[in-house]
Amino acid sequence: MGSKYAVELRNVVKQFITPEGGEIAAVDHVTMQIRNGEFFSMLGSSGCGKTTSLRMIAGFEWPTEGEVYIDGEPQGHKPPFLRPVNTVFQSYALFQHMTVQENVAFGLEMERVEKAEIERRVGEALEMVKLSGMQRRRPKQLSGGQQQRVALARALVKRPKVLLLDEPLGALDLKLRKEMQLELKSLQQEVGITFIYVTHDQEEALTMSDRIAVMSHGKVLQIGPSVEIYERPTSRFVADFIGESNFLDGRVKSVKGDQAIVNVPAWGEELTGIVTSKVRAGDEVAVSIRPEKIRLAEKQGIKENSLQGVVVNSTYIGSDTHVYLDVRGQRIKVWEQNRISTLDPRAYYRNGQKVWVMLLPENTLVLPKD
Amino acid sequence: MLRRLREDKSIQGTFLITPTLVFMVGLLIIPLILTTIVSFGHRSADGGVIYAFSFDNYLRLIGYSTQCDNGASVCFDPLYAQIMWRSFSLAFNTTVLVILLAYPLAYFIARAHPIRRNTFLFLVLIPLWTNFVIRVYAWMMLLRKEGVINIVFGWIAGMLHIPFTPLEMLYTPGAVLVGMVYEFLPFMILPIYTSLEKIDNSLYEAAADLGANPFRTFLRVTLPLSMPGVVAGTILVFIPVMGTFIVSDLLGGRQVILVGNLIQRQFLDARDPTFGSAASLILMVLTLIVTYFYTRKFGFGEEIVV
Amino acid sequence: MNPHRRSPFILIATILVYFFLYAPIFVLVIYSFNSSRANVQFDGFISSYGDLQIVNGDVTQSPCGPFHWFCELSKNREVINAAKNTLTIAFTATIISTIVGTMAALALQRYDFKLKAFSQVSLYIPIVIPEIVMGIGILTLFSQLFSLLNNWLNLAGDARMTMGLFTVILSHIAFMIPFVTLVVQARLQGFDKSYEEAAMDLGANEWTTFQRVTFPMILPGVLSGALLAFTLSLDDFVITFFTNGPGSTTLPIYVYGLLRRIITPQVNALSTVWISIVFIAVLLLQWIQSREK
């Protein structure tokens, strides 16, 4: 391996010309390092620049500014066919005029690999994606999931340094998608190739990735392992985009180590929470608490971050009960796990019931306002 | 009764297809049958038809004769076979040339910005709206001894100080070929464009991603996927060229006689409709055979409708 | 530089092919201002206005100046009649074949009936059989039919039935129907039946469904079918050649007849007028399209 990083983007900018003649930056000064052998996801809603970033790694687009490095080598204006990466397309982009065998063999023929070798490697690749025996079929004769596997085999058979996947599971139904997520993850561990995976589905990203880059409006907001992204978001946007959260506006009173005391004017109270990024006394901040991390009780348990509220709505959804509360004029949502099996309605929260809401300081995050 | 008509899908379908069938049977199928009948008849003194069942016209077409110069009892005059062969090879050459010219243009339009595509397509259609005959006439003006091409060549020769005598281009087989290519070029561009336009951009990207350079991408992906368009275009060009007579009439003069000219003269100048009918039936059978084998090999292009 | 750039070969080939398509038309237009009556070579433009003056076969002065041949053309009754005929044929045949062809497309795509396979195959006849074969077939049919009827009804002189506008229009319709049908069929194929089902589910009967849902959705197909039919009718020579009769001469037939005898700049002037109309029509169409967006 030539470099510590399989792929590196340094200060990459990609501008497009809009039909009206203006310019928009689809990717705006993005820097990220993707390590060898990792499963890396780029996560964001449509138009956030994740697909454009992927296409610049593949070579379908060239950066307006900055540089893409693959295995330590600057790629410049190298065309896709000279780059040691392969792509699984969102639409699969299978060649309809070729059989499954011919599709998978295509890339090896381009490398002028020997015939017998091609035969062997195509067989292996198809076996790996559990499509042995389908060699002579045409893509049109296969189901969506099978076509997806052909696209995967076609890219993997080239043994690329990096495999780029552009929302490859987007067209599959939920059940198949879940299956494929696990399969892709174990496949990646088996072959040891770096995967760069683009998705807008946060659950998918959390399930599969070693690390995730959350993107918005052409910028990278945070890069880190799934746990870090979910438990220690560094911005309000990330906390909101990944999972659900309650947000309260406030102003920082004081910071001590990684803890801050925040004054929340809506309540006239002070809350203590964890600081995940640079905030100073006097800053306007958003206080974020995940709904499953709020404790409800009939009596006040702790003194800090503890308030009284009224149940407005309570919805039983099987594993959890979603409780919506009015806490001094603020709407707060709480997910309570149903740990005890019972039919007794008194075991669940009722509308109008008064409860104590406890926002434990270790579960409370103080985030800069976007 | 009305209710039954509303509910019966078969009656509705029959109602919708009937006018078309009337036209197809009345003006295409019955005339073909009539032509067949006439082809077995004789010519009357005033250029009419005497119905009979004789193969004389067909024997004449293959040049069968019992009065031979060399004393043999039966011999064949290849005159008409030569005309057939000339038409066939002209149609073949025209088609090949037209494909070579049409493909890059169709490719260009298909990959142009969608906003500009319509304009480029209109530019292909406009010559068609100027009418077939006017287009041939334009080439008469260009190819004549005193025509524009010779004038331009003269200028160039003059600039290079080379002696130049105007070329005789009109009334040659080459003139007929150029005229045919010009006439039928749009009919190849449109279907090839249609099939190229259907190719998703991601397929080109996939090929490049898998290591194919632009040339190999073209050979392995673009070309095979656009074959339906080429097939449709070939049908739209080859068949009409086989039966056209004005281009050869106006640009080939008496030099280039094609099946079309042969048939047309039987109906107007020589006035033997029975022989003309036989010749046109042979022409039809030949084109059907060629089309059959061609489409069996490459499939019938649905791009035939542009 | 970007990865989407086209190869210079394609660009050069494109420019050359467009040049090949338009150079002859350009020359045709230039020659319509030729001062030479014989129109064999270009002797320059007619430069001055005034009474007609001809020197050595060159028109040196004309009341219409450089537009001499256009004026001559406008006095030519035959040309005006031929132009009228051409447009009458093209418009009538386009309208009828569009209606009939669309009906057939609906029948073939949405209904089952006897003779369906036969109908579909018969549509390919004009495509796979050379026009001249069909032309002489129709000529034979009409001439036999008319002589039969003329004898039977004892018609003589001017009362005799002959080929004319009517036969040309009928033949054009027969040739254009298949193209319209195939275009509309292609459109119907890509059109999900569930739209129609949704309309019926919402309470529309078959006719309302057709009017409000099916027709608007296939309209682009119908229009491009009509455009194709119109193009083929205007461009046609062979079918018209064999089916026209006295009084139904079209412009192409007139020009062909002229070209076999003499060449005059009048033909160029006629072409120029024709091409100008086509260009203006296309520009108008483009303008309307761009305004709709």
Image: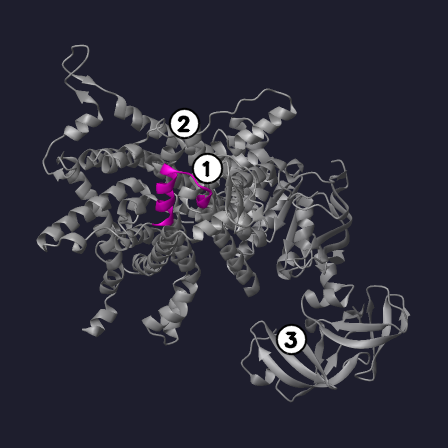
Give the letter of the chain under mark 1: C
The chain letter for the residue carrying disc 2 is B
Looking at the image, residue A338 lies above or below residue A187:
below
Distance from Cα at disc 1 to Cα at disc 3: 100 Å
Q: Are marks 3 and 2 in contact (CB under 8 Å)?
A: no
Name the outermost residue toward the bottom: A352
Which residue is labeled 3 in the image?
A: A336
Left or right of C111 in this view: A323? right
Q: Position of residue A312 (x, y in %)?
A: 64, 85
Camera sees residue B157? yes
Disc 3 is placed on an element classified as strand
Q: Is residue B271 above or below residue A40?
A: above
Segment colored magenta: C250-267
Mark 2, residues whose alpha carbon is within 10 Å: few (<14), some, or many (≥20)? some
Write down the residue under mark 2: B173
> Height in image: C176 above or below C130?
below
Residue mark closest to the camera, 2 vs 1? 1
Which chain hosts label 3? Answer: A
Q: Nearer the viewer, mark 1 or mark 3?
A: 1
Task: Please indicate whether residue B22 sits to the left or right of residue A335 in the image.
Answer: left
Q: Hey, which quadrant is residue C10 in on the image?
A: top right
Viewer-nearest residue: C65 or A298: C65
Q: Are marks 2 and 1 on the same chain?
A: no
The one of C140 and B7 positioned closer to us in this rendering: C140
The residue pinned by badge 1 equals C38
Question: What is the CA distance from the residue labelled 2 to the residue labelled 1?
Answer: 25 Å
Q: Is residue A103 visible?
A: no
- The residue under label 2 is which amino acid type? Pro
Residue A272 pos. (x, y %) = 83, 74
